[in-house]
Amino acid sequence: MNAAIDQEWVELIATAKQQGLTIEEIKDFLQTEAEGSHKQKTG
């Protein structure tokens, strides 16, 4: 199952890059989403 999930992440990031996002923008987005998700669970 990890291989399937890993492949989905590879495809997701490749698509984001094709759309013109930088790796830094992708990281920033994921970090923001993780923080928002954490706040919802604890808030």
Image: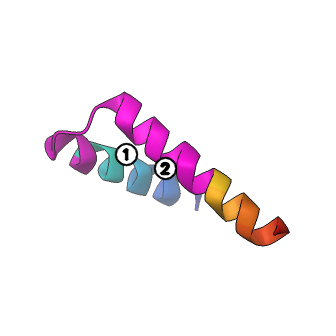
- Mark 1 nearby-residue class (10 Å; few <14, some 14–19, many ≥20): few
Assign the magenta stretch its main secondary structure.
helix
Q: Secondary structure under badge 1?
A: helix
Quarter of the image for residue 17 reads: top left
The one nearer the camera, 10 or 35, is 35
Residue 9 in the image: x percent, y percent? Answer: 42, 51
Residue 35 as seen in the image, left or right of residue 7: right
Quarter of the image for the N terminus: give it: bottom right
- Residue at the (47%, 38%) spot, across then down: 28
Residue at mark 2: 6
Colouring scheme, one of rainbow, by chain, secondary structure, one colour: rainbow
Q: How many marks?
A: 2
Residue 36 in the image: x percent, y percent? Answer: 63, 59
Q: Which mark is residue 37?
A: none
Q: Which mark is residue 10?
A: 1
- Residue at the (47%, 59%) spot, across then down: 4
Quarter of the image for residue 38 reads: bottom right
In the rendered image, the residue lying farthest to the right is 42
The one nearer the camera, 15 or 29, is 29
Residue 19 sits inside the magenta stretch: yes
Label pair 2/1, CB-CB below 8 angstroms:
yes
Q: How far, Cα to Cα, is label 2 from label 1?
A: 6 Å
Q: Which residues fall within the magenta stretch?
A: 15-34
- Mark 2 nearby-residue class (10 Å; few <14, some 14–19, many ≥20): few
Residue 13 as seen in the image, left or right of residue 6: left
- Residue at the (81%, 69%) spot, across then down: 43
Residue 18 sits inside the magenta stretch: yes
Q: Amino acid at mark 2?
A: Asp
Q: Amino acid at mark 1?
A: Val
- Residue at the (45%, 46%) spot, across then down: 29
